[in-house]
Amino acid sequence: MQLFIFDDYESLSHRAADEIISLVKQKPNAVLCLAAGNTPVLTYKYLVQKARDENIDFSNCVFIGLDEWVGIPPENEGSCAWFLRKNIFNNLNFLPSRIHLFDALAVDLHTECNAMDRVIFYAGGIDLMVVGIGMNGHIGFNEPGTSFDLYSHISQLDATTRLVGQKYFKEQTSLGLGLTLGLKHLLESKKVVLLANGRSKADIIQKALLGEINPAVPASIIRRHTESIIMIDKEVASHLKQKDN
Ligand code: PGA
């Protein structure tokens, strides 16, 4: 695990975008899992700019969705699908046939999870995951207490996720279940980049990086991954140091 501390959100986002760009240059058919959420918005903006400047081709890449809110259709602005379309797919030339997202409206959610696992398996595994961290320490919808041994699964969203998740929606939305890749996918991916910025994430990052490696704080699993990079800004880091002393 490597930890990088940046002066600000902008420099963190530049560095995260560079990670994605350099992988795709090296491996044009990379399997990418790029999370939705507020944290990576600027990373994806810079990714799009850099990809245009350097003429990077994403048409051979495979895109794997990290998670989705069950029951929320892709045309709802709060859905992960909507976010990914707006921030990534509308701006980079991923082929629709190589984009694999959970169908939040699937009748059989177990089958949906198994199908995602098969896609990842046959794609040869994930090369790079870029993820955020929830206020409760979740990655994707791997909520506190979730086994590190799971692949894709249906997640019972915890109270924090249901509450914090309202920020993505225009109106109050009932959230109950999620579909998510599992932490086993994260452990097996060739590289993971975890991003966190802003004071509100300081406490949970401190727990994830300095506390026990334990499903109670799902993001603590990042320390088990030899090719993981944590990118945080100074606001997150200063809290880390205070707590550390
Ligand atoms: P955020 O979400 O980037 O919107 O803070 C992170 C997460 O819940 O995983």
Image (cartoon, grey):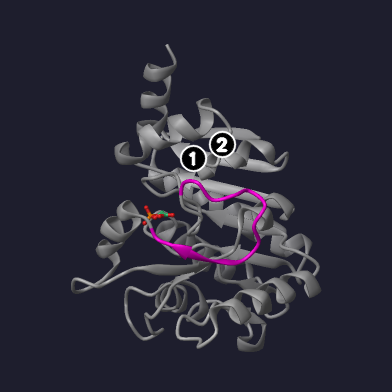
Q: Give the x, y percent position of residue 183.
A: 62, 53
SS label for mark 1 = loop
Mark 1 surroundings: few (<14), some (14-19) or many (≥20) residues within 10 A: many
Quadrant in the rendering for residue 207: top left
Residue 175 on the magenta segment = no
Please say whether residue 152 is one of the residues in the magenta stretch: yes
Q: Is residue 111 above or below residue 187?
A: below
Q: Residue at x 59, y 77 (%)?
A: 110
Mark 2: secondary structure: loop
Q: Residue at x 52, y 31 (%)?
A: 209
Residue 57 visible to the viewer: no
Looking at the magenta stretch, what is its main secondary structure? loop
Query: Residue 90, how many percent across, how many down?
Result: 48, 81
| Residue 205 vertical position relative to residue 111 in the rendered view, above or below | above
Residue 204 visible (yes or no): yes
* Amino acid type at image mark 2: Asn
State the image quarter where residue 244 is shown: top left
Residue at the spot of label 2: 214
Residue 74 placement, left or right of 77: right
Near-viewer residue (27 or 223): 223
Residue 61 horizontal/vertical position (percent): 70, 74
Given residues 135 and 85, the one toward you in this image is 135
Q: Residue at position x 39%, y 80% from top?
A: 71
Q: Is residue 62 left or right of residue 92?
A: right
**Quadrant of the displayed image that contains ligand 1:** bottom left
Magenta span of residues: 144-157
Q: Quadrant of the N terminus?
A: top right
Rendered image: mark on residue 49: none
Is mark 2 in CB contact (under 8 Å) with mark 1?
yes
Residue drawn at (63%, 48%) of the image: 148
